[in-house]
Amino acid sequence: MKTTQRRNERSKTLENGRDHSLPIPIDLVFEIFSRLPVKSIAICRCVSKTWSSILRRQDFTELFLSRSCALPKLLLACQKDGDLFFFSAPQPQNLDENPSPVVASCYMKLSLDAYFRNGAFEISGLDQGLMGLTHQWIGEKRKYSVPVICNPSTGQLLPLTRVKTRRVKSRNLFGYDPIDKQFKVLSVSEVGYGPTNMKYEEHQVITLQRGKLSQRLFNTDRVLHHLEYSKERCINGVLYYKTIEFSTNTHILVCFDVRSEKLNYIKVKKFLTKGTMVNYNGKLGLLLSGVYDSIIESSTSVNLWVLEDIEKQDWSEHTYVLPPSWKDIVGRKMLGFVGMTQTNEIVMRSERGPRSPFHLFYFNTKKNTVVRVEIQGIDEPEYTRVHIFLDHVENVTLM
């Protein structure tokens, strides 16, 4: 009954607030608008109040997002001082031996000096095409941090509530709950000074839902300290990050359930902490080459460790031998892992040497092939850091 009622509502013509209406079913209007580029959506929102109202509706933004998920893109976020430049390019598909270059175009520049001075911020990929920005650390002289959620499609920056702390250092980690559709920030605070006295103790959770913010503080029975090179990864509502248990010096993978806000701890081997965290078919994967976090000249394979069960702490290991054409295509380059695509291709980039032209390397584990894709339109040496996000989707939701 509810489904029939909703269909009837969606089939009604659109009222413009006066005595006139658009003699077009709203389903058809949604279909037309959902096929437009993001920039065109932004322009159309300014045409009239009627169009603005249509393009702000939740059912339209959900339709646009679902269509975008079917056509993921390659997103490059380039830092330069306090500015962030977003480049977008088609996601390479069905790569052959000699793929054509991919052209990236810059469509957005955001100035972040009002939030982070001198470009001292970290960027994290979130679900739904959004990103999280935060200070690298909250230091002794900076007693609060303002986490920021960014929508690269609309250029919006949404600062959340200040994360206050009485501690020496804190770090903010971003997660998303796909069931309740909530974005959350887990702020983990640390006590003490020096590498032997670094330990986490205080946790805060900031929740964003329908424009409202809530904040909760809790402590844990474990004292941990952070691996500074570690980055978090949120997969299917679970936020993963790496730490070391203070008392035993044991390497720990923390699993934070974003919906229930409960923590699980998994002991891992030391070399696994170097692995690049990826989404492997909805599970956490760690990419390494042997015990290294990069592929070096002597590497012969890529190892993928998959967390099969959080409660049982069960892992599986997959080994992919590099193809014979590897050295002809890659040469002596040291490659770092970018991630894995939805089609389970391992993507890498050069970590040393000249980076112009800019290349990505796609390792197809099923076909056992590797191809080099040139990314045109971006001069990598011009920027301080270049962050690469695979399978990016566009989201026209206004925060």
Image (tube, rainbow, N blue to C red):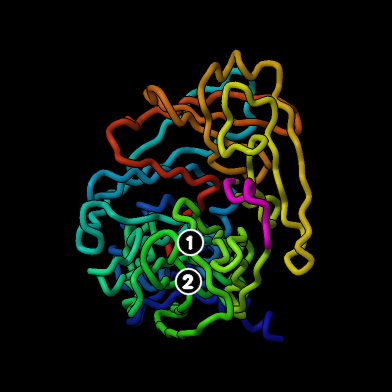
Q: Residues within 10 Å of mark 2 (few under 14, many from 20)?
A: many
Q: Position of residue 367 (x, y in %)?
A: 75, 28
Quarter of the figure that contains the N terminus: bottom right
Does the magenta segment cover residue 34?
A: no
**Residue 250 versus residue 362: which sits nearer the camera?**
250
Residue corresponding to mark 1: 226
Residue bearing the label numbered 2: 200
Q: Are marks 1 and 2 in contact (CB under 8 Å)?
A: yes
The location of residue 399, given as percent across then percent down, is 38, 71
Horizontally, residue 32 falls left or right of residue 307, namely left
Question: Secondary structure beneath disc 1?
Answer: strand
Looking at the picture, does residue 205 appear above or below residue 386? below
Q: Position of residue 163 (x, y in %)?
A: 35, 76
Question: The magenta stretch spans which residues?
Answer: 267-274
Q: Residues within 10 Å of mark 1 (few under 14, many from 20)?
A: many
Taking the spot 32% from the left edge, 64% from the top edge, the residue there is 157
Q: Main secondary structure of the magenta part?
A: helix
Is 71 rendered above or below residue 97?
Answer: below
Front-most of residues 77 and 105: 77
Of the pair 109 and 335, the residue shown nearer to us: 335
Q: How many marks?
A: 2
In the picture, measured across the screen, residue 102 lies left or right of residue 287, that is left
Vertical placement of residue 316 versus 262, above or below: above
* Residue in the picture at 75% in, 63% down: 313
Three-letter code for the amino acid on which mark 2 is drawn: Tyr
The mark that comes first in sequence, 1 or 2, is: 2
The correct choice, above or below, for 44 with respect to 37 in the image is below
Residue 270 painted magenta: yes
